[in-house]
Image: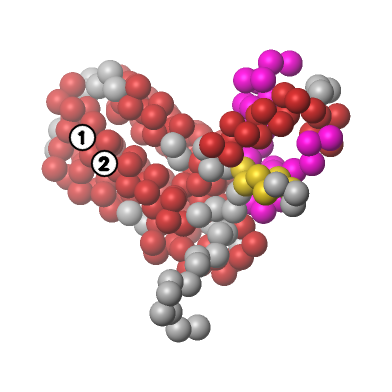
Amino acid sequence: MANEEICSILYKNIMLLNLKPGQMLNVNSLAEELGVSRSPVRDALIELSKEGLVDIFPQKGTYVSRIDFERAEEERFLRESIEEKVIPLFIKYCEEMDFLRLEGKITLQKEHFKAGDYAGFLEFDDRFHEIFFERTQKLMCWEVIRASSGHYRRIRLLTSQDAEIATGVIAEHEEILLAAKKRDAAKCLELYRAHSSKLPLQKEKLMEKYPDYFKQPFLKRGSLI
């Protein structure tokens, strides 16, 4: 098994929360499970640590990184900044087939949520947005977003399990699609900004529900407890 494949397997399991934030990672156990030697597993963990998904503490152990809200917000900001530029281009160049594809992704989101497949729900959420980048020939930008969203994506998977949030996401996608069909770029941008700015509102609820999953902020000098 190539190093890239090992890294991909571990990455996928972190993104799907099969390897949970804060969970200790035992190199021997992972190597045995994957049927490989320790060396490529160690290399994969080092690569994932560079992406902020694994924390390696010498003499103490290796852990799946806890979700960092500050980093997640920066990842969200990066995505929003790029996608805001792409949406007006999509409105300019989109075709009827694009609307049918967007409708199909919404339908699949509904089906996966109904089936309790939250990872599938999130995947088709992303595929909905990916269509904007495909039509405008900006897939390299989309790949940058995907590769830089490890903390934000894990938060999105957690929120996908909340019925109120998930149904809200679907409704917002339907509104964005309707505005796109009307070729109303300004309305699309307005709806998209509202759609992508929910993270601060969800923070307290998530930290209360999953306290062990999140990195606790350091108190700044002079802060009062």
Q: Residue at x 65, y 29 (%)?
A: 44
Disc 2 secondary structure class: helix
- Asked whether 172 or 220 is in front, the reply is 220
What residue sits right under mark 1 in the picture? 85
Say if mark 2 contacts mark 1, CB within 8 Å: yes
Q: Which mark is residue 81?
A: 2
Picture residue at 37% right of the left edge, 49% below the top: 74
* Secondary structure type for disc 1: helix
Position of residue 164 in the picture relative to residue 201 (left or right): right
Q: Which mark is residue 66?
A: none
Q: Position of residue 107 (x, y in %)?
A: 46, 35
Q: Can you say which quadrant of the picture contains the N terminus? A: top right
What residue lies at 51% left-to-right and 34% top-to-bottom? Answer: 123
Which quadrant would residue 199 be assigned to in this image? bottom left
How many discs appear?
2
Binning the other alpha carbons within 10 Å of mark 1 as few (below 14), some (14 to 19) or many (20 upward) gives few
**53, 128: nearer the viewer:** 53
Extreme residue toward the front, this view: 59
Image position of 196 (left or right of 217): left
Residue 178, image x and y in percent? 25, 39
**Residues shaded magenta:** 1-28
Q: Amino acid at mark 2?
A: Ser
Would residue 33 appear left or right of 25 to someone viewing this image?
right
